[in-house]
Image (spheres, rainbow, N blue to C red):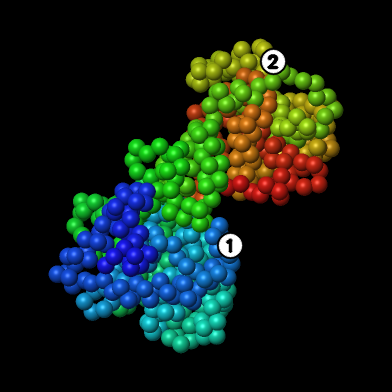
Amino acid sequence: MTAARLYRAERYIANVLEGKINTCKWVKLACQRHVDDLENSAARGLYFDRSAAIYAEQFFAQVLRHPKNSIRAKVGAPFKLEPWQLATIIWPLFGWKRADGSRRFRRGFVGIPKKNGKSSISAGIADLLVFADREYSAEVFSVAGSRDQAKIIFDISSTMAESAPDIQVRCEIYKRSIIYKDTHSVYRVLSADVPTAHGINAHGILFDELHVQPNRLLFDALWGAGKARRQPLFLMLTTAGYDRQSVCFEIWEYAQNLLEKTIPADDSFWGVIYTMDEGDDWLSPKIWRKANPNLGVTVGLNSITEEARLAAAIPGYQNTFKRLTLNTWTEQESRLITAEMWNSGQVAPVERDGQGCYGGLDLAATSDIAAFVLDFLLGEEGGHFWLPFFWLPKENLEERGRATGVNYETWARDGFLRLTEGNVIDLGVIKRDIEELGQIYNIKQIAFDRWGAREISQELQDMGFQMVEFGQGFKSMAAPTKEFLRLTVAGKLHHDGHPVLRWMANNLTARQDSAGNMKPDKEKSRQKIDGIVAGIMALDLALRHEDDDHSVYETRGLIKF
C-alpha cells in the first residue's frame, strides 16, 4: 500500500519508525510492536481488524464534539483525533482482536504529560464503550484518587453525549451516571472508597491520574473487576509521579519492560509513554515535542517556554516542570532558590515610616525561631520589599548554635535577632514588639498560622490589628509560593540583606502535591525557614489587596505547577 493511501494512524506509525517524527524511545517501541505483531501474531490467535479501528475512529469524528476550546478546535467542532492518538491509543485498543473476535487488549496504559488532551480522549473512550461497543448491560466507571477528580472525565463525557443528538435522545443523564436505554448500559463515577469497588462487573474502567493513588487498595480491587465480561477494558491514563514505591510506578515499569521485551510478552496489555529520553536536554524545544505530542493543539509553545524559563531559573521548580510537562519521574522535594537569586533582590534599607504594609507571623515551636515579616508594595517601582523580625529563647543559645552550625549570638549582638529570657519564646515580647511596629508602620492586616498562634492573635486583635487565619496546606500556600518564586527570579522581591532571612532562603525546600502545587516544606528543609513562610503569608495578603479593589489572582489567575 502506498503512503498516500495510508490512514492517518498508519502514516504516523510509519513516520515514527522512519525518524520523520521526533518522539521518544517508548513511542518508537510501541509503534514497532504494532508493526511486528501485524507480521507474526496470527500464530498466537491474534489479528488486527482494520475496520474495527476505523469504526472507533469514526465514532469520535462523526458522533462526538469537542467539549472545550483548544488551539486548533472550538467547542462543538467534530472531535477529530490527532494521528498520535489514533496510532498509539485508539487503533491498538479497538483494532486488535482475539480469535473469537473480542478485544485483544484488556488493559491499557498511557503515560502522557498534562494538557495533552488526556481527559477528553478518556471521556470519548468512555462514551464509545457505553454507546457504541455493542455490549448489553455494560457498566463503565470513571475512577481517580477522589470522586471530584473522577468526575472530570465523567462531566466531559456527559457534555459530549448531550451534544450528540443520536445519543442524547437514547440516554438519561444524571449528576453522576448516564443510562443508555438501548442496551441497558450505564456509565458511573466510582467513589474512591475501596469497599464500593469490590464486586463490580465492569465492562470499562477509566482510571485517571494513577500516580495520585495513596496506596494500591483501590487499584487492586478493580484490577480483575471485568473478568466476567466478554471484552473488558481497564484503561489507565496518567502523568508521571514522584513516589517510586507506588502502584503507578510499578505499572509504568511494567509497560516499559514489555516494550523492551525484557519480560515475557503479555498479549492482553498495551502501553505507550510520551516523555523525554535519558540524556535529553530538558530545556530544548525539540525535546518538549517528544513528550508533548499535542504541542500546538492543546499545548501552547509559549506556555511551555514560560514554564521552562522559570524552571531554568529556580532549581526547585525543575522537578515540577520535568514531571508535569516532560512526564519524567522526579523526587517530591527540591531546593527552591540559590544564593545568587536571593542576593539579586538586595537593596539598601529605605525609610518606610507610615507606609502601608501587610504582615505574616509564624511562631513555629516555642523553643525555635519565631518570625514576623512585613511586606511593602513598591508601587511604581514594581515588586515588594520584605522587612523581617526574629525572636529566639536566650537559654542554651550556645549549645543550639553548635548543634545547627549557626552563630545565633552574632546575629543577636548585631541586632538581627531578639533574644527572650528563658528556654521558650516569650510571646509577650513578640506582642509588644509588634505593637511598637504598628506605631511606626501602617500594618493593614497580619496573617498568622492557626497552629500555636491563637492566643497571641487574639491579643493582637484586641490591640486593633486585623488578624487573618492562614492555613499551611497547598490550598493556601501554593499560589503565593509561586508568586514568591516569580518575584525572586525577576529581581522584584527586595530586602535589605538581613542575614537571618538570607540563611532561611538558602534553607528553603519545597514539597509538591500530586497536582504539582508547591509549598515550603519545613520538615525537609535543611534548617529553619520560618521567615520565608511568614513572608509568603504577608505577600499573599498584599497581592489580594493590590490596588485595593481587586486581587492579583483575579487578573492573573491562581497559578498551579
Hey, what amino acid is under mark 1? Asn
Q: Residue drawn at (45%, 65%), measured in percent from left and top?
A: 81
Q: Who is closer to the viewer here, 554 or 441?
A: 554
For label 2, the residue is 415
Q: Is residue 162 visible?
A: yes
Q: Residues within 10 Å of mark 1 (few under 14, many from 20)?
A: few
Query: Which image quarter is the N terminus in?
Result: bottom left
Say if 70 sits above or below 327 in the image. Answer: below
- Residue 208 is situated, as x and y percent measured from the top left of the image, at 45, 61
- Nearest the camera: 189 or 370? 189
* In the image: residue 263, left or right of residue 247: left
Nearest to the observer: residue 423 or residue 365 = 365
* Kind of residue at badge 2: Gly
Task: Please tell me which of labels 1 and 2 falls first in the chain.
Answer: 1
The label number, if any, that marks residue 534 in the structure image: none
| Local secondary structure at mark 1 | loop
Residue in front for this viewpoint, 499 or 494: 494
Q: Is residue 161 left or right of residue 414?
A: left
Judged from this view, the residue extending furthest toward the left is 43
Residue 93: quarter of image: bottom left
| Disc ID at residue 69 | 1
Q: Residue at x 50, y 53 (%)?
A: 296
Judge depth for marks 1 and 2 and give the one in front: 1
Q: CA distance from mark 1 to mark 2?
A: 57 Å
Q: Which residue is rendered at x = 42% and y = 66% of the image?
A: 206
Residue, x 57% and y 77% (percent of image)? 162
Examine the rendered structure and indicate whether residue 194 appears above or below residue 367. Answer: below
Query: Residue 284, image x and y in percent?
Result: 44, 39
Q: Residues within 10 Å of mark 2 (few under 14, many from 20)?
A: few
Q: Is residue 26 left or right of residue 405?
A: left
